[in-house]
Image: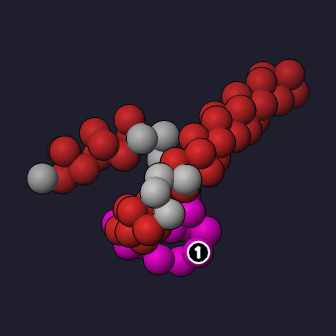
Amino acid sequence: MRQISNLLERSAFGVCAYLGKKMGITSSRVRVYFIYLSFVTLGSPLLFYLFFAFWLNVREYIRKSRNMIWE
């Protein structure tokens, strides 16, 4: 079960884990809230999720390129 969880977390860009870490709650609870919110609002949080995933990837890319310049 742990392997499946790790695979899903890596393929899902780590958005729920990042939000959970910032808010101080487990990532599984963030996922459950995200799923419930998606059902209630007919999927509109999906746009937020995709935007946040894109932003995290861009931020990671900038952070890696910044480290390479100073080394």
Q: Secondary structure at mark 1?
A: helix
User: Left or right: where does residue 63 sit relative to residue 50?
Assistant: right
Q: Main secondary structure of the magenta part?
A: helix
User: Left or right: where does residue 1 sit relative to residue 28?
Assistant: left
Where on the picture, by quarter, is residue 64? top right
Where on the picture, by quarter, is residue 27? bottom left
**Relative to 52, is 28 above or below?**
below
Query: Measuring 28% from the left and 39% from the top, which residue is drawn there?
Result: 7
Residue type of the residue flagged with mark 1: Met
User: Left or right: where does residue 41 sit relative to residue 1?
Assistant: right
What stretch of residues is rendered in magenta? 16-31
The answer to whether residue 34 is seen in the rendering is: no
Identity of the residue furthest to the bottom in this view: 24
Identity of the residue furthest to the left in this view: 1
Q: Position of residue 42 (x, y in %)?
A: 46, 57
Query: Measuring 54% from the left and 67% from the top, which residue is drawn there?
Result: 21
User: Left or right: where does residue 55 sit relative to residue 34?
Assistant: right
Does residue 23 show up magenta in the picture? yes
**Relative to 16, is 50 above or below?**
above
**Relative to 12, is 26 above or below?**
below
Query: Measuring 38% from the left and 35% from the top, which residue is drawn there?
Result: 11
Residue position marked by numbered label 1 in the rendering: 23
**Relative to 46, is 37 above or below?**
below
Front position in the image: 70 or 49 = 49
Q: Quadrant of the C terminus?
A: top right
Does residue 25 show up magenta in the picture? yes
